[in-house]
Image (cartoon, rainbow, N blue to C red):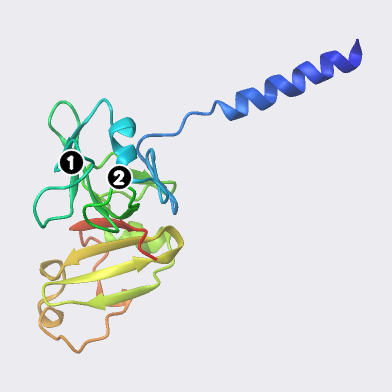
């Protein structure tokens, strides 16, 4: 009798842990909401059944040369832009995700409305790349690339293409322009 009660309790605990629902707005190294790094394009209809998918046609293919798939809430708010690893292939996995909605956040509350201070306080910056109009901050531990417009930087740093950016060059209040999760590796 005692063994069956203990077995029942163990089974109940196991089932409770298995039924933990995935947060549809959580970002981690291997998932963004309900998407994982192994999600295929053909699975998007099921994952976003209650939302709208744009540039996705009935043959599980894309239109034109642009390889992006846009995800909108039913109300019209744009959530994500997905880029598959291969064009016109329904079995391709997602390679890159642009986060557009501020409800998406990491376990350390990094969102599209965060500042450089939030990045610096919560994550180890892997590298900073100097582009023409922006800088790109890579955070390898969560597969994230964040773009900050050079307009957010002091004037003397905006036009020097040879400058190797360090964290100290970027103001704490610099806002995020683009927030990407990159699964292309």
Label 1 CA crowd tier, 10 Å (few <14, some 14–19, many 20+): many
Residue drawn at (28%, 33%) of the image: 45
The mark nearer the N terminus, 1 or 2, is: 2
Kindly give the residue lying farthest to the bottom in the view shown: 162
6 versus 102 height, above or below: above
Q: Nearer the viewer, residue 47 or 146?
A: 47
Q: Which of 87 and 171 is in front in this view?
A: 87
In-image side of 106 versus 19 (left or right): left
Give residue 95's position: percent from left, percent from top.
32, 57
The part of the image, by quadrant, that contains residue 65 is: bottom left
Q: Is residue 35 something that shows in the picture? A: yes
11 versus 135 height, above or below: above
Give residue 43's position: percent from left, percent from top.
34, 38
Q: CA separation, marks 1 and 2?
A: 9 Å
Give residue 35's position: percent from left, percent from top.
37, 42
Find numbered disc 1 in the image and state the secondary structure of the residue it sits on: loop
Q: Nearer the viewer, residue 63 or 185?
A: 63
Kindly give the residue lying farthest to the front in the view shown: 59
Residue drawn at (14%, 26%) of the image: 75
**Residue with the mark numbered 2:** 41
* Image quadrant containing the C terminus: bottom left
In-image side of 84 versus 6 (left or right): left
Residue drawn at (44%, 67%) of the image: 124
* Image quadrant containing the N terminus: top right
**Residue with the mark numbered 1:** 56
Give residue 100's position: percent from left, percent from top.
21, 46
The part of the image, by quadrant, that contains residue 143 is: bottom left
Q: Do the residues labelled 1 and 2 touch (CB within 8 Å)?
A: yes
In-image side of 119 versus 55 (left or right): right
The part of the image, by quadrant, that contains residue 138 is: bottom left
């Amino acid at each position: 009798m005692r063994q069956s009660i203990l077995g029942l309790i163990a089974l109940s605990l196991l089932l409770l842990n298995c039924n933990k629902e995935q947060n549809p707005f959580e970002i981690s190294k291997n998932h963004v909401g309900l998407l994982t790094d192994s999600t295929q394009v053909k699975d998007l209809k099921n994952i976003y059944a209650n939302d709208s998918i744009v540039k996705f046609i009935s043959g599980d293919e894309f239109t034109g040369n642009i390889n992006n798939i846009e995800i909108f809430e039913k109300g019209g708010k744009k959530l994500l832009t997905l880029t598959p690893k291969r064009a016109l292939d329904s079995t391709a996995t997602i390679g890159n995700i642009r986060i557009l909605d501020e409800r998406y956040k990491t376990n350390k509350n990094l969102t599209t409305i965060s500042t450089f201070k939030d990045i610096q306080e919560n994550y180890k910056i892997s590298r900073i790349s100097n582009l023409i109009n922006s800088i790109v901050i890579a955070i390898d531990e969560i597969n994230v690339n964040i773009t900050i417009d050079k307009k957010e930087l002091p004037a003397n740093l905006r036009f020097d293409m040879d400058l190797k950016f360090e964290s100290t060059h970027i103001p704490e209040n610099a806002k995020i322009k683009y927030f990407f999760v990159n699964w292309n590796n």
